[in-house]
Amino acid sequence: MNHGFLTRLLLLALLFSLHDTGSLFAQQSTTERSASNKYMGRRIAETMHYAGAPWLVRESREREEECTKLLAALEVKDGQTVCDLGCGNGFYTLKLAKLVGPQGTVWAVDIQPEMLQLLEERAEARGVPNLKSALGTATSPNLPEGEIDLVLLVDVYHEFSHPAEMLAEIRKSLAPSGRVALVEYRAEDRTVPIKPLHKMSQRQVMKEYKANGFKLVGQYDELPWQHVFFLARDDSPLEEVELKRWKRGERDSEAGEDEATSSEFEGVRQ
Ligand SMILES: C[S@@+](CC[C@H](N)C(=O)[O-])C[C@H]1O[C@@H](n2cnc3c(N)ncnc32)[C@H](O)[C@@H]1O
């Protein structure tokens, strides 16, 4: 018997001796699994690794993204229960905790335990008594049902490897008049220095959210780089509003649907 054949035979035997070959795949990182995935014509982006967390709290973020304006547009009220879903190291979590005050609660959810650890370190230094954190999975944020007044999704929805499952769980977590604030980099705007894979168009957002039982109840388009959509359950008492299309101009494109593959922009979001 030749030596190479014997080695291959041994490797095969080893593979079959594992009780659950599925677990090999379960151990694949989210990054690998989602890289080839598509949802409703859109390529799903890979998860941002926790090693990139310093970028989320970079000194230039306020100047580039006008985060203070976004926070004001959320109209968070004292005593509310809000969730920063895909919180990373908590750039928005800690600001939300201040806005809801001591009577309110902020839930911080991320799929990477390392991100939650980084958030906890930042929170500890500041003392944040109204913070609760939950480790999410690819299909659920593990939130309590019917309690959340606002779910904030900043630069994360396009990374969900299982968007429909996540939206079903988010929908369940909302209080009767609860809202989702979806914040994504504008695919229509070529000047936004972010790779196309990490952007979303208005058309794609509305297609995906409507298909999953949501309606548009508000919109904020005054940020330099990002769209903000306010969405509610389609059976919510909140009134549906019509989408205002992003102002077309020579710097805009029709990009955003299944064409986000070019490396035309070596954007800051790798
Ligand atoms: C680009 S970061 C944005 C972090 C934060 N929202 C911010 O703006 O500073 C995206 C984060 O979403 C998390 N994430 C991706 N998929 C997720 C999921 N299904 N559930 C919870 N978190 C998720 C990633 O681990 C990562 O920390």
Image (cartoon, rainbow, N blue to C red):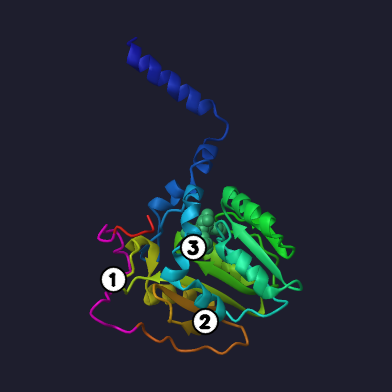
Residue at x 60% of width, y 83% of height: 235
237 to 122, vertically: above or below = below
The amino acid type found where label 1 is placed reads Arg
User: Does label 3 point to a residue whose CB lies under 8 Å from ligand 1?
Assistant: yes
The one nearer the camera, 108 or 203, is: 108
Q: Quadrant of residue 76?
A: bottom right
Give the CA distance from mark 3 to mark 2: 19 Å
Question: Tag 2 or tag 3, which sits nearer the N-term?
Answer: 3
Q: How many labels does the image show?
A: 3
Q: Measure the C-alpha gap from mark 2 to mark 1.
A: 27 Å
Asked where in the image residue 236 lies, by quadrant, the reply is: bottom right
Residue under label 3: 156
Circle 3: is it few (<14), some (14-19), or many (20+) Cα within 10 Å?
A: many
What type is the residue that disc 3 sits on?
A: Val
Question: Magenta stretch: dominant SS?
Answer: loop
Magenta residues, start to end:
247-265
**Image quadrant assignment for residue 250:** bottom left
Percent x, y of residue 82:
65, 71
Q: Where is residue 102 in the image (x, y as percent from the top left)?
A: 75, 71
- Mark 2 or 1: in front is 1
Residue at image location 48% in from the left, 47% down from the top: 51
Which mark is nearer the camera, 3 or 2?
3
Along the viewing direction, whichever of 256 and 24 lies nearer the viewer = 256
Residue on which the image places disc 1: 190
- Give the mark nearest the N terminus, 1 or 3: 3
Most distant residue in the top direction = 1
User: Mark 2 sits on what residue?
Assistant: 215
SS at mark 1? Answer: loop
Q: Judge whether residue 139 can be spotted in this image.
A: no
Magenta span has 118? no
Are the residues tagged 2 and 1 within 8 Å (C-beta)? Answer: no
